[in-house]
Image (spheres, rainbow, N blue to C red):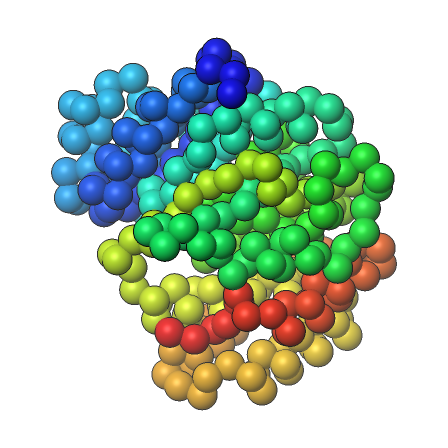
Amino acid sequence: MNTAPDPRVTVVVITHNRRPELLRTLGLLSGLPEQPRVIVTDNGSDDGTAQAVRELFPQVLLLTPGQNLGAVGRNLAVRHVHTPYVAFCDDDTWWEPGSLRTAADRLDAHARLAAVTARIVVEPAGEEDPVVAELRDSPLTGPDWLPGPAIGSFLAAATVMRTSAFREAGGFHPGLWIGGEEELLATDLMESGWWMAYLPEAVIHHAASTARDSTERRVVGLRNTLWFTWLRRPARAALRRTAYLIATVPRDRASVRAFAYAVQGLPWVLRQRRPVAPAVEARLAALEKAQRQGTARRYVG
């Protein structure tokens, strides 16, 4: 393994009230042979996160917006990125040594490649995350030069992205906050002619934080799925997707809340609605069909 520093990648981490997980991740990132610059956006934590980072990792650029910006905290961090590539990870994920270099090499080699998503290993079991199967068996086809299967979305906790492509697409949409926020950005990248790929040679580890509200995550994730659908899918596809979700999500209070929040956002969604071109819609339809048959995405919890 090449143990020399690699100046091509900056790592961006967002966090909120997960001090122990963040400190573990920063410790592991600081030991990477690539020695990447690390930027942390502390999304309004009140558990001493910021103070701990300043004391234990003074080399980290710490941003403290004073509120929970959700995924937009990554946009804030990318303003301070001066490298051609930015590696996103969460406070409960960390990159395996050598993976950032591998990702940068692939991005260097292909000018229209916007992002590569790594193989995700769940800890402490050391097993592949179920979403890996969807990435590996993606129904999309792409140009022969892609370094792995073409994908139509990505996971921000496990992706290295071309900084210029991120900025060109506008970053993460502030309206979605967090929870499936990648789908909209990925679609806008595809609409602009960018490609994304699954890169199994790059590996990221995920030890899911226990400090999470699975029900609230489901509410926000379902709401964002609906908003994305209404923002970018053509009318017939949007109606079909909405009807499918109504018929298949759990019939409980969480689902009712998700749909209610989504309907409340209709005014701004309709103002910003911009359906994709037929070629991109064909990819989205193929992904939708594959996801219905998969087990990684379920609005339960």
Quadrant (top left, top right, bottom left, bottom right) of the C terminus: bottom left
Residue 159 image offset from top left, x and y in percent: 54, 40
Q: Is residue 5 left or right of residue 213?
A: right
**Most extreme residue toward the top, as rendered?**
4
Q: Is residue 213 above or below residue 35?
A: below
Residue at image location 81% in from the left, 46% down from the top: 142
Residue at image location 81% in from the left, 51% down from the top: 141
Q: Is residue 82 above or below residue 122?
A: above
In the depicted view, which residue is nearer to us: 178 or 212?
A: 212
Residue at image location 34% in from the left, 71% down from the top: 215
Residue at image location 42% in from the left, 44% down from the top: 205
Residue 42 image offset from top left, x and y in percent: 29, 37
Observer able to see residue 267: no
Residue 231 image offset from top left, x and y in percent: 65, 60
The picture quadrant where one finds residue 138 is bottom right
Q: Is residue 34 left or right of residue 55?
A: right
